[in-house]
Image (cartoon, rainbow, N blue to C red):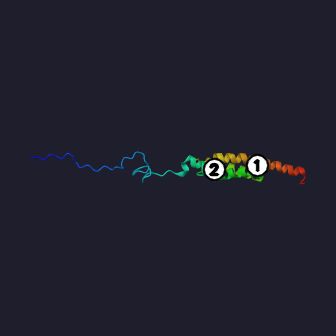
Amino acid sequence: MSQPTPPDWPPQQPQNPFGDRGSDPFAPGGAYSAGHRTPDIADDPAMRWILPLGQSVWSIISGYSGLLSLATCFLGPITVITGVIGIFELRRNPRLSGWGRAIIGITLGTLGSIGFVVMIIALVASGGR
């Protein structure tokens, strides 16, 4: 005669009370467990507004020197040159950003250059008095 099988056969594994946590990132096997890639800070658009991450160095230089060229006009031509170099670098490497800084640098550098030319004309016209 055969023996009846027990009602809980095969034996069940104990259930993990923390196993089904949905999208909780701090649960075991959640979003931050091993095997998942941690997001890169340079991929966050909000961080790119705050910090110059993933931007062309020439664009950063052009943006800041563009601001300074409004106060010191002799930086205007240098700012335009760094802005143009920044745009060439951005076209070569599409992963970088910084178009806004390069364009602002060229614009403010042009205004600073115009002020520099006006200042030289005024000095020449006054005869160096």
Foreground residue among 14 and 129: 14
Q: Of helix, strand and loop, which one carries label 2?
A: helix
Q: Of helix, strand and loop, which one carries label 1?
A: helix
Indicate left or right for 6 with 73 as reference: left
CA separation in Å, label 2 and label 1: 23 Å
- Residue tagged 1: 112
Foreground residue among 23 and 114: 23
Foreground: disc 2 or disc 1: 1
Residue 106 on image: x %, y %: 71, 47
Residue at horizontal 77 percent and vertical 51 percent from the top: 73
Question: Mark 2 is on which residue type?
Answer: Glu
- Residue tagged 2: 89
Give the residue furthest to the front: 17
Question: Mark 1 is on which residue type?
Answer: Gly
Disc 2 or 1, which lies upstream in sequence?
Answer: 2
Residue 82 on image: x %, y %: 69, 51
Residue at horizontal 65 percent and vertical 45 percent from the top: 100
